[in-house]
Image (cartoon, rainbow, N blue to C red):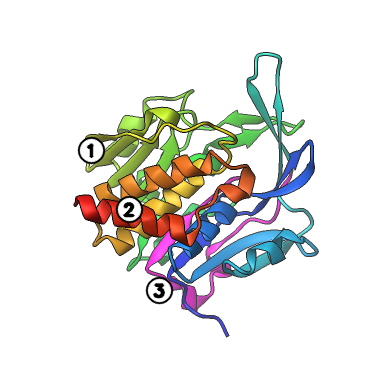
Amino acid sequence: MIHTPDYLLIGHLTADLTPNGRSLGGTVSFAARTAHAFGLHTGILTSAASDEPFIEQLAPYAEVRSIPAAHTSTFENIYDERGKRVQYVRGVASKLHAGHVPPEWHAAPLVHLAPLTDEVDPQIARLFSGSTVLLTLQGWLRRWDQDGRVHFKRWFDPEVLRHIDMVVFSEEDIAPAPELEALFAHAVPHLFVTRAERGGTYYHRGQPIPWDTPQVPVVDATGAGDVFAAAVLAGQHLLDSNLEAATRVAAVLGANAVTRRGIDGTPTPAEVEKALAAVRQNA
């Protein structure tokens, strides 16, 4: 039986190629574990190879509906002699369309669109008129050449954004087109632009509100932005829709994430409760 989740994620889980082999990645993976730590029943609509073992790894954290594909979406990051990252796509799973979303999931109160390979049909956002919809933008800003090397692709569609309440991206995501920050700030009610150790900027209907982040030793920044985004969406749900308070919770959990490697950077229930308690105490 399919149940309506509290927190619905739509996007590809990924296999990330590392010197130590394949590892589970993708926004849906980090965000599902984060939402689960907030105590929310989570659902994932994704696509992967039918025999992909990573689907089972996500089962303790979410109800997973996977559209079969010939390949799991796969990324490889290669660093040059200056330490600059060059990203490659080594495989792509199936596209996700509105018809793939079970009718029972249309009523999910929290919806997180999490494209990574331009796999999420933007028209899916229209399904959730009664939901709070968050978009992590990076996957709609990617294209890749015949060798799989990832390049920036500009995306800004006001008609789609009318159906989205919150957008999260990093300043690095839009580095080739920094003017997008102002465009998005005036196109959606809530925009969050993350700036790594410098915190970030929350725009409420175009008005900027900066936030700081705890300064911690960085072990691995992979997935920290996904933890932040999921914590904002889940946090505001538990904090009477107080986005500034949710941002403070998310900043702490995102900082915690970089102190651990890979998927282990997602928060524990104890870390979530500690961050929520601290914000409530200072409210």
Amino acid carrying mark 2 in the image: Asp
Is mark 1 in CB contact (under 8 Å) with mark 3? Answer: no
- Residue 113 magenta-highlighted: yes
Rendered view: 58 above or below 11: below
User: Which residue type carries mark 3?
Assistant: Ala
- The residue beneath circle 2 is 165
Q: Residues within 10 Å of mark 3 (few under 14, many from 20)?
A: some
Q: Which residue lies furthest to the top in this view?
A: 82
Evaluate if marks 3 and 2 touch, with contact meaning CB atoms under 8 Å apart.
no
| Residues drawn in magenta | 91-117
Q: Are marks 2 and 1 in contact (CB under 8 Å)?
A: no
- Of residue 102 and residue 266, the one placed in the foreground of this image is 266
State the mark number for residue 53.
none
Q: In this view, does 272 lie above or below 77?
A: below
Residue on which disc 3 sits: 107
Which residue has dot 1 on it? 206
Residue 262 falls inside the magenta stretch: no
Viewer-proximal residue, 268 or 81? 268
Q: Which of marks 3 and 2 is nearer the N terminus?
A: 3
Answer whether residue 163 is visible to the viewer in this image. Answer: no
Q: Which numbered disc flags the more N-terminal residue, 1 or 3?
A: 3
Residue at the spot 37% in from the left edge and 35% down from the top edge: 213
Residue 194 relative to residue 151: left or right: left
Mark 2 vs mark 1, CA separation in Å: 13 Å
Report how far apart the C-alphas of labels 1 and 3 lie in the structure: 28 Å
Label 3 vs label 2: CA separation?
16 Å
Q: Which amino acid does label 1 sit on?
A: Gly
Task: Specify whether residue 191 is in view.
Answer: yes
